[in-house]
Image (tube, rainbow, N blue to C red):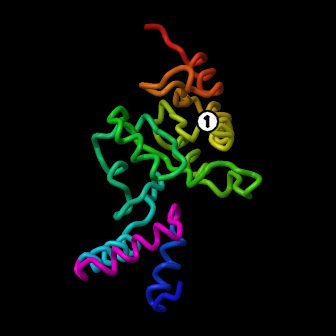
Amino acid sequence: MNNAPALQKLLDELERLPGIGSKSAQRIAYWMMNTDAATVLRLADAITEVKGTVHFCSRCFNYAEGELCEICASPQRDRTTICVVAEPRDIAAVERTGAFSGVYHVLGGELAPMEGIGPDELHIAELMRRLASEDVRELILATNPNVEGETTAAYIARLAKPLGVGVTRLASGMPVGGELDFIDEVTLARAIEARREI
């Protein structure tokens, strides 16, 4: 399709976004063309502002506008418990549960040697420094339940245990509302292993 050069440039840039294919890029671009200019300018301003003001927290590597993120700066959070996650977006998932009141540490990914991601590419050394200098009693490993996440959790657990910190892993198993015959074997096996008395 022959688009105006400015429109084609927008389409090309939108297609570079994760999860956006050519059809989604067209829908977004055409929405921008048909909506009022003030709405599009607000979107552009929000993108520019976030790139200019948001950076990583100096303690946990979550997104922050100040030196510390809101969670690290909050006096209400339990600093004796650190939940280790792969990415900042994982914090939002845990926070939505309302079940955790501790602090976090973001690794910036998970170990994936085949992709060249080793311990030096992640914030593991910074985590070990936190464990050595802060009064941490429990380290909750909340990496993804896949090969990379399990490898990362095992590696961190091996480093943390000699420091006298309790290390736990998020339980994994059957989702609420799930039916047994639709659950894959690995998930069902983990649910059986992580069963608890009622």
In the depicted structure, whether residue 131 falls above or below residue 57 = above
Residue 182 horizontal/vertical position (percent): 55, 26
The magenta stretch spans which residues?
Answer: 18-38
What amino acid is found at the position of numbered circle 1 in the picture? Ala
Q: Residue at x 60, y 23 (%)?
A: 190
List the single residue furthest toward the right. 114
Q: Quadrant of residue 35?
A: bottom left
Q: Residue at x 51, y 44 (%)?
A: 133
Q: Main secondary structure of the magenta part?
A: helix
Q: Is residue 49 magenta?
A: no
Q: How many marks?
A: 1
41 displayed left or right of 129: left
Residue 142 horizontal/vertical position (percent): 52, 38
Question: Foreground residue, 11 or 86?
Answer: 11
Residue 80 horizontal/vertical position (percent): 42, 35
The residue to which callout 1 is attached is 160
Q: Quadrant of residue 183?
A: top right
